Amino acid sequence: MDKKVLIGFKLGDLWTDTFVFQKGKRQGETGVSLKARLLFISWIKINGDMVYQAPRRDDDQPEQHAQEAGTAEATPPQPDPVPTQPNGYAAAHTGESAGSFESPAAGSF
């Protein structure tokens, strides 16, 4: 169709895959192919016209600003406050079963 298509994207888990050419002037030679997982498509242009732009994600903004500033470290998340008095679950489930992934039907209340 003679159209120029450009795509902005993010890849992850990049790896190489080797193969042997089966036809052509390189028949019998080993080739290498790069493979990756497609994580995100940010935009698509066809013949210079923007046909798709991903909606802006607000939760990416702090991380994006930290990367633009050249800092490798972002502020670490603050831990949740620890309750000063035991809650009902912790009081009812002491010992080995406390914090387990058993369903409520498996234990007695």
Image (cartoon, rainbow, N blue to C red):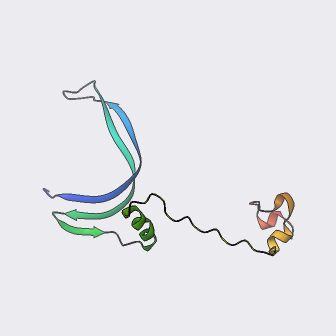
Question: In x, y percent, where is residue 83?
Answer: 75, 74
At 33% from the left and 38% from the top, the residue drawn is 33
Which quadrant would residue 100 be assigned to in this image? bottom right
Name the one closer to the observer, 33 or 73: 73
Looking at the image, the residue that sits furthest to the left is 2
Question: In x, y percent, where is residue 41?
Answer: 34, 61
Q: How many labels sit on residues? A: 0
Q: Quadrant of the C terminus?
A: bottom right
At 48% from the left and 59% from the top, the residue drawn is 73
Which quadrant would residue 87 be assigned to in this image? bottom right
Name the one closer to the observer, 59 or 68: 68
Question: In x, y percent, where is residue 17?
Answer: 38, 36
Q: Is residue 17 above or below residue 91?
A: above
At 84% from the left and 57% from the top, the residue drawn is 96
Question: In x, y percent, where is residue 69?
Answer: 38, 64
Looking at the image, the residue that sits furthest to the top is 28
Q: Is residue 10 above or below residue 14?
A: below
Name the one closer to the observer, 69 or 33: 69
Which quadrant would residue 2 be assigned to in this image? bottom left
At 49% from the left and 63% from the top, the residue drawn is 74
Left or right: where does residue 11 sit relative to residue 26?
A: right
Q: Is residue 51 above or below residue 5?
A: below
Q: Quadrant of the N terminus?
A: bottom left
